[in-house]
Amino acid sequence: MYAKLISFMTAASLASSTLAHGVISSPPRRLPGAAFEAACGSQVYSIVDSDQFGNQQQEEQNFNSETTSACQVYLCKGLLYADNESNLQKFSANQVVPIEIDIEAPHTGVANVSVVDTTTNTVLAGPLIYFNPAYSVSTPIPANQTSFSVTVPDLGSSCSTAGVCVLQWWWDARSIDQTYMSCVDFTQ
Ligand SMILES: [Cu+2]
């Protein structure tokens, strides 16, 4: 009886550490597609396509001979603008952008949103917002960590070309070595 209960609990806790976790639900985020599959391989593609809430480490653990150097999972989880041209947003200087985060399972960590130049994987502006602790397991998640706004600054000409700039939500739970990213393509 006890053994059965314990094995059930172990299975449940294993499931919660491998099941997933968080994405931007609005504005439209980068999704997996053919370009991502070509860069990262079919196995990594299947993992992300079947569960978009997953973390970057899970992708790395599934790198194989199909995975190319173009698979940069530390940036937008490796998802690519080429698969997401129809999701491109336009944000003017100082536009206030509402962001919704869908958290499927919390993990205590830190999180932020920044403007990232995807051609160099450098932060152009931000963090525009920062949470510490973020999405804690020890308290209810504050509403302003899943529904908030950021102000996109004047980026000059840095983000005038489609596919260069993203708003990247980045959530890092060091305690369990899981990192989540979700990106919104935009021009200004
Ligand atoms: Cu998780």
Image (cartoon, helix red, strand yellow):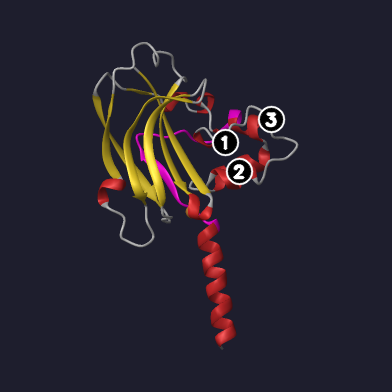
- Residue 154: mark: none
Decide: is 182 above or below 22: above
Q: Which residue is mark 2?
A: 59
Mark 1 Cα-neighbour bin, 10 Å: few <14, some 14–19, many ≥20: some
Asked if residue 175 lies in the magenta stretch, the reply is no
- Residue 68: mark: 3
Q: CA distance from mark 2 to mark 1?
A: 7 Å
Q: Residue at x 34, y 47 (%)?
A: 132
x, y percentage for residue 75? 52, 32
Give the structural element (helix, strand or loop) at label 1.
Answer: loop
Does the residue at mark 2 contact the one at mark 1 (Cβ under 8 Å)? yes
The one of 103 and 173 positioned closer to us in this rendering? 173
Q: Is residue 46 left or right of residue 75?
A: right
Q: Which residues are magenta?
A: 18-35
The amino acid type found where label 3 is placed reads: Thr
Q: Locate the C terminus and report the quarter of the image it occupies.
A: top left
Disc 1 C-beta below 8 A from ligand 1: no
x, y percentage for residue 108? 41, 54
Q: CA distance from mark 3 to mark 2?
A: 13 Å
Disc 2 C-beta below 8 A from ligand 1: no
Q: Is residue 187 left or right of residue 64?
A: left
Q: Which residue is mark 1?
A: 73
Ranked by sequence position, the earlier of labels 3 and 2 is 2
The amino acid type found where label 2 is placed reads: Glu
The one of 154 and 47 positioned closer to us in this rendering? 154
Q: Residue at x 63, y 27 (%)?
A: 70
Decide: is 104 above or below 179: below
x, y percentage for residue 154? 29, 17
